[in-house]
Amino acid sequence: MTELDFAERIERAGGRAYVVGGWVRDAIRGMPPHDKDYLVAGVSEAAFESLFPGARRVGRHFPVYRLRMEGGYREVAFARREVKTGVGYRGFSVKYDSSVTIRDDLERRDTTINSMAVPAGSESAPGLEHLIDPFGGARDVERRIIRATSGHFTDDPVRALRAARQSAQLGFSIEPGTIEMMSECLDELRYEPPERIMNELRLALDTVRPSVFFRALLESDLLEAAFPWLYPLDGDGAGDTFDRSMLALDRAAGISDRPEIRFAVLACSIGGENYPRTASPEYRMMEIFSRLEALVDWNSRMTLPGLWMKCAEFAVKEGAKALEISRPGEIADFLARLERNPIGVDGIAAVILSGAQELPPFLRDADEYYSAMRGVSGHSIPEGLAGPERSKWLRARRIESVTRVSRQKTNP
């Protein structure tokens, strides 16, 4: 079934079908649009199911269907009107009968750039005569502004996080009135399910400049409620720690597209006292322990992905240590630990470079060091060695291989 077939069936039943949301926004921006989301108005749920018997309902609280169209599966939602009746994202009374109009549905959406639609099956490009834009979204796209669509913005506190994330994704600024509305979401945001906040964090870390997301939350007084582990970095007396951590995060985003590595860079800022590299080993260990405690607390409250935790723990424990080791035994042991961790050479390198530090030679040439170390295998262990003696022999030989590579680098 084509989009035009779909739209014509809906129209013959007395309704209208629309393309809504991000696809329209991106088409106006001249960017390659992603998957289309459809919305229908003016038909009942029973009529829709009779028109499309193969459609499968996936929405639990209001009608959303998966329908095969244009060679794939598309989501089709019913136009709805929401009335705030309680706290949080479930505190709504939802109306979605055939009296709800397209304007009603667009008005309840978060920001103007997502509150536009075009008739499904329209041959004209968005931005021309068929664009439905009652709240000035196209103008805000042109001005590169994030603006709340209506007073409904504050009905769901996570919309404040979405506005911050949209700013990071698109490189748009948030207009002052919307910053104020974001601030009004503070009380309810404290009680939001952690998984909803986690979803916005995932998306924000996937942007070109993730710091924009966190700076917008700081400006709107929401950072402490959403990410209390980062809030103390602002004004902690340690010399713009928040700014330094945001700069490191953006550097990491420019080096690695792996979200777990970007998160690991954040983890290297939370907790701790940011002792200088000249501080005593005791103070440095206290700093690492404090960061790990903060990381564990973050995980206990938000359930971070296991991959994120493993990479972050390694970065916190080993990132600074990598800059200080030089002896062959230390290098061999570090590379052995690194090989067992999913952060990988590229990940720990991104963590180090994000702090504007130079990579130590053994990481710059890690492939050569690993190749030499792997030349020593269990098959080489002399007969008669058992238990810990086997491990000691292997370690000694690998240290010798590291020593050879280091000498070759020093005296080519």
Image (cartoon, helix red, strand yellow):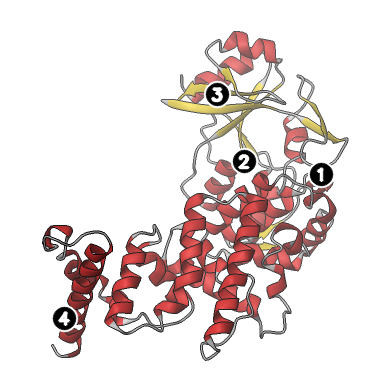
Of labels 2 and 3, earlier in sequence is: 2
N-terminal-most mark, 4 or 2: 2
Whether residue 126 is visible: no
Q: Quadrant of the C terminus?
A: bottom left
Q: Answer yes or no: do the residues labelled 3 and 1 have beta carbons within 8 Å? A: no
Q: Residues within 10 Å of mark 3 (few under 14, many from 20)?
A: some
Q: Position of residue 190 (x, y in %)?
A: 79, 52
For the residues marked 4 and 3, what is the alpha-carbon distance in whole angstroms?
61 Å
State the residue at coordinates (63%, 75%). Answer: 272
Q: Is residue 141 left or right of residue 61?
A: left
Q: Nearer the viewer, residue 267 or 251?
A: 267
Q: Residue 131: percent from the left, percent from the top?
A: 63, 40
User: Depth check: 349 or 30 in front?
Assistant: 349
Pointer 4 and pointer 3: residues touching (CB < 8 Å)? no
Q: Callout 4 environment at 10 Å: few (<14), some (14 to 19), or many (20+)?
A: some
- Sort mark 1 into few (<14), some (14-19) or many (20+) by Cα contacts within 10 Å: many
Where does residue 328 sit, x and y in percent of width and height? 27, 81
Residue 238 falls in which quadrant of the image? Answer: bottom right
Pair 4/3: label in front: 4
- The amino acid sitting under disc 3 is Arg
Q: Which residue is mark 2?
A: 21
Q: Earlier in the sequence, mark 4 or mark 3?
A: 3
Q: CA distance from mark 3 to mark 1?
A: 27 Å
Q: In whole angstroms, how far apart are the C-alphas of marks 1 and 4?
A: 65 Å
Residue neighbourhood size for the residue with mark 2, other residues' Cα within 10 Å, grouped as few (<14), some (14–19), many (≥20): many
> Dot 3: what SS?
strand
Residue that mark 4 sits on:
404
Mark sitting earlier along the chain (1/4): 1
Residue type, label 4:
Arg
Quickly name the residue at label 1: 155
Q: Residue at x 26, y 59 (%)?
A: 387
